[in-house]
Amino acid sequence: MFLSNNSLEISYADSPSYASNVLTLTEHDENAFTQGLEMYGDRLFESTGLYGSSSLREVNASSGQIIRQISFSDDIFAEGITIINNTIILLTWKENIALIIDIDTFDVIGNYTYSGEGWGLCNDGKSYVMSNGSSEISFRNLENFDIISSIVVIEDGIEIPNLNELECVGNSIYANIWGENRIIEINMSSGQVEKSISIDSLEFNKNSSHSVLNGIAYSPSDNAFWITGKYWSKMYLTEFIDDDLRISEDFVTEEEGFLTKYTNKIISFIIIIIIAIFVMPGSWPFFSLIFYKLFKRQTEHLGASGKGAREDEIT
C-alpha cells in the first residue's frame, strides 16, 4: 500500500520464502547492543544502543576487532545508521535528533530534528529511509530531514509492525522485524513484502529475549549481507537462497548419497565374486548356477510384466 497525495490500490501475493546461506563468519563483540550495521566501500560501521552505553564504532570485517569508537553521553540512546557523502547519520530513540558525524574523525558536525521515535535508517542516494517501530517507513529530504512521502509495509494483505534495522539495496529495502528471526525484502515503491528470509540457520542465543537480530549490511563486493544482532558473538556474511531450491538441492544430495551407498556395495560384491572365481577355480560351477538362476528369474519376471502390461492395454 503506497501513501502519497493520491491513493493507490495494489494486489497482494504470498511473499516467497528464502533461507540464509552462510558464506563466512567473523567475531562480534558479544557485549554490543547492536542497533545499526553499515558497509561503506570496504569499511564496516556499527552503532550500539542503551542509555549510558551507546556508541559508534568502525569494525574490521575480517576479524571483528574494533578499529575505533566513540561513546555518547548518558542521555543518548543510539539507533540505526546510514552513510552518505562521507558522513554518518545516526538516529536516536526518543531524543528526536539525528546526529551528523564525520566518517573519518567521528566528530559530531551537526544534527537533524524529527518527531517520534527513531529505529532504523538507510538511504537510496535520493532520500533517507527511516523506520520508527511501526509498519510505516518514511522517506526524508537529504538536506533537512523533512518527510517527503511514506509507505506502509504489507505482507499477504496484513500490515507488518515493529520494523527495525533497514538496509537499502537498489529498489528494495531489507528490514528486520523486532523479535522475529527473519528479514523481509520490501518494494520501495509499493511497500509490498517481496521476500521473507529466515535466519533460523544462524547460531545465536535464541533463548534470550534481548539477543535479537538487529544488523543488516549489504556488501557490494561480495553481493551478500553481513548479519548480526544484539549481544551476538558472531557476524555472518550470508546470501539469500530460495527455500524451494534449497529443499530440492537437499533432496538431490540425499538421493545421490543413497545411490552412491548401494552402488558401492554392488561393486564390492562383484569384485568379491571375480576374486573368488579366479582364486578358487572349483567355485565356477557354483557361481555359474547362481548367475543362471538369477538370469532365469529376471527373464521370467520381465516376461510376466510384459504380459501384464499388454493385458492392461487390451482392457
Image: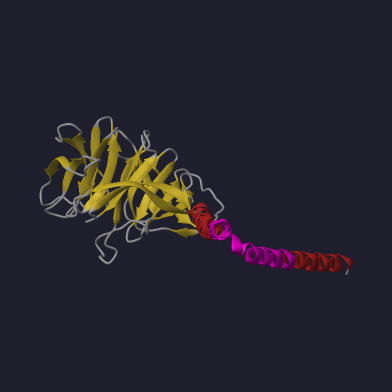
200 to 219, vertically: above or below: below
User: Which percent across, then down, holds residue 81?
Assistant: 26, 43
Across and down, in percent, residue 198 comes to 41, 56
81 sits left or right of 152 in the view: left
Q: Is residue 166 left or right of residue 295?
A: left
Image location of residue 106, percent across then percent down = 15, 36
Q: How many numbered marks, from 0 up?
A: 0
**Residue drawn at the location 22% of the way across and 54% of the way down:** 233
Residue 104: name its quadrant. Answer: top left
The stretch drawn in magenta includes residue 271? yes
Q: Is residue 87 left or right of residue 244?
A: left
Scheme of colours in the image: secondary structure
Kindly report the secondary structure that dominates the magenta region of the rendered protein.
helix
Query: Which residue is most to the top?
Result: 85
Left or right of 303: which side holds 224?
Answer: left
State the image coordinates of residue 243 (x, y, percent, origin top left). Answer: 48, 54
Q: Of residues 306 and 118, which is closer to you in this image?
A: 306
Q: Which residues are magenta?
A: 269-297
Instruction: Say which quarter of the image contains residue 42.
Output: top left
* Viewer-closest of 28 and 182: 28
**One can see residue 171 in this view:** yes
Q: Can residue 118 be seen in this snapshot?
A: no
Q: Can you name the residue that lies furthest to the front here?
A: 282
Q: Is residue 264 above or below residue 146?
A: below
Residue at 27%, 45% in the rendered image: 37
